[in-house]
Image (spheres, helix red, strand yellow):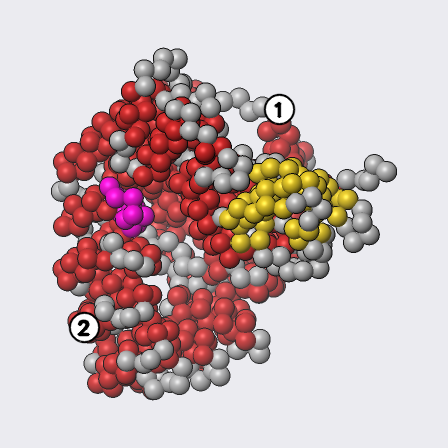
Amino acid sequence: IGLWGTAGTVVDTHQAKRLFPIFGAGGILGAVVGGLLTRPLAGALGVENLLLVWIVGLVIAAALSRLALGDAGFHPAPAQRRVALLESVKSGYAYVRRSRLLTAMALAAVLFSILFYSLFLPFATAATDRLTDADALAGFFGLVGAAITGGAFLTSILLTNRLFTRFGVTAMILVLPLLYLGAFAILLVGVGFATIVALKVTTGVWLQGVASPGWETLVNVVPDDQRDETRAFLNGGPSQVGTGIAGLVALVGQDVLTARQFAAIGIVASALTVVVVLAIRRSYVDALLRALLAARPQVFEKATAWTPVPLDVDAQSATVLAGSMRSSDVRARRFAFRLAAGLHASALADPLFEGLRDPDPLVRLAAVEGIETASASGRQSLAAMIDDADPAVSAAASARALTFGDDRASARLDRLLGEEDPAVRLIVLEHLGAAPDGPATDLAGRALNDPDPQVEAAALLCLASSAPERALAPAVERIGAADPAVRLAAGRALGMLGPPAAPFVLEALSDPETAPAGVEAARRLDAVGSVEMIRTFVDAGAERARRDRGLVSATPEATDLEALLRAAILDRARADARAALWAASMVAADREAHSSAIERLDASGPVRATALETLEAVDALKMVGPLLALWEPIPASMEDDGDWLAKALDDGNGFVRRCAVAVRSRREGDTQMRSVETVSVIERVLLLRRIPLFADLRPEDLERLAGIAEEQGYDEGESIAREGEVGDAMHIITGGAIAVVAADGRVIAHRSAGEFVGEMSVITRNPRIASLVAEGPVHTIRIGQREFESMVRERPDLALGVMRVLALRLEESARPDPT
């Protein structure tokens, strides 16, 4: 529990797939070494002092855990978390009880524990009778433990995956109770010491090396959100119940039961376990089928490739998958074929060949991608699909056929790439990854000047993959392209090109227009050899951050307009700092953690605090401290020397300068901006900032939204919108009040300055459910539906604001009428 709890805390799910086998190997190595050292340590220290060795080992393990975890795992759990843990256990039990497979596994866990200790008792008794010297006995137990663990390790890496692939997981678990059944049958007739030891080692090796990995594979059919709770319940509940039962039988029976009677009890328990495992075998097939229909591909994924014999897919999973590949339900066939194409399992070869004749093009496409080309039959089958009527199938088959030199494949891809439909041209480029680099480079180069931006972007990425040396110039040229898809593709391409792209990535990060593409590049770029260049870039950003923080601090926020200017300066400064942080991520100790932390900087509260701590922790070159200060609280200065305004008026950011001009105009007594009839863009931004729907938007985004809005005026009693008409705009009230009136004339709600109306119809595109009537003179800012939807798509923060407001509206409508 300690080992896997620590391991699960310090690595994420993706890392666990690669590192858990190493942790497990460490545990096995320790068991082997400990077993071999037991005898010499017992002789040197005395058997009773082996407890001291054990204690020292625990202290060292605790120190190493503390080093790995830091402070993360050493805080007392609050009461609510202890309650949550109990609820988690209850949830695991409830889930197990609803599943036939897991119920059978729970019963099997009890029986396996009984079997284990029922065989251990005669083994330990025989060893104690044979070896009366305590040191020798301790050394013997250590040696047997080392032999079992070492044998299990070799079995698991050399044999287990072969057995699972050939016979299936449950069949190999079934072998364990059969081994116990044979062992107890041998004990029943009476055997010597060597035979008992051999039985113990054999069952132990199979348990650790084959049955335990198979058991964990069975738990894999449980959905992700229930898997940990289920595993904890099975290991902590039924297994311990079985241990208790075995101990009770041993304590009660050691004085009243003979060795043969113990063996007879073991035979009965083994037979019962065989029956239960057969039930598991039947239930496992049903669980696999449900997992497939529920689109949970992880159940069928390959095992980690750290073993010499990687597991393609176990025999029962292959049987279920093959059956689904022949299903009459086209959706089930599609999903099964997609899984099979990625597994490349020999057991699924025949169904894949059959899929080439399927009437559904998506099934044929998956079959084409899964067919192996090592055999002549595979190459012939692929060649036959070159002229398939579906462009995707034809392109995939042609791209793969190029690997074995089919002349028709190149001509077919040429024709497809010349089609008028850009979707067909895009399909060709998407499948060129399966083609050899030479032909892929030629075809991608032709498509670089395609008139369709999506095709151009795909061609650039394909070129970067097949011929990096030829992709640098086209990527740099397109980093500032008008189309955002091409810009982002150029950034991703630069990230694939290695050190030569580093200066261009830094240049892209420094320009707000190309910064998103620069981020895409920074995520991917191998920055080896560019450390000094990156350090210089980040140091310059840190210096600017220091100056910007001082300017933010000097800018007062006594008025709403000054507060807007302060926010605009801070937002611009953070954008600059982000560019430097992304540059630093390319040389960070943990790039993944660094990148994830940058994306969480705009969160609030503990999430932002954690992101700041992470960035400091993974900052290998110790460069980002001044940058992070921009996300710490910045108190406003109490002195106003006016220098801050001069600097803001001279700022390189256009929105900052416009805010500064507005502040200066107001300070100099220019009241034209305050006119109710003509609200300036900056004034609109001030209004939008007070609306909950837009409160989380960046100041420059608010300016963009204010720029597309229109001013409207209405007289008392004038209808702003009528019930039943399709709403094409929402209104933000800048002056006056609006009544929301139902069809029967009843006033549902009143909206006043700072609030907005009409958003429900704009969001749902349904007819308005109420009329909007001016209560006296009313002034609004109108935002059209098309412009509103565009902003929602571009800004996820706005979408979250919409959801919050909708929730408030629903809560308001659900309140009982006070009348």
The residue drawn where x is 76% and y is 44% is 748
Residue 658 visible? The answer is: yes
Task: Give the crowd class for mark 2: few <14, some 14-19, many >=20 residues within 10 Å.
Answer: few
Write down the residue under mark 1: 79
How far apart are labels 2 and 1 at the CA level? 65 Å
Q: Secondary structure at mark 1?
A: helix
Residue at 22% from the left image edge and 27% from the top image edge:
543
Task: Find the magenta span and give its range.
Answer: 509-520
Q: Horizontal and vertical percent for residue 490?
A: 26, 56
- Farthest residue in the right direction? 819
Asked which secondary structure carries label 2, the reply is helix
Q: Position of residue 547 (x, y in %)?
A: 26, 24
Which residue in the protein does label 2 denote?
442
Q: Position of residue 794 (x, y in %)?
A: 44, 51
**Residue 95 or 632: which is nearer the viewer?**
632
Q: Residues within 10 Å of mark 1 (few under 14, many from 20)?
A: few
Say which of 230 and 540 sits in front.
540
**Residue 395 at what x, y percent from top left?**
33, 77
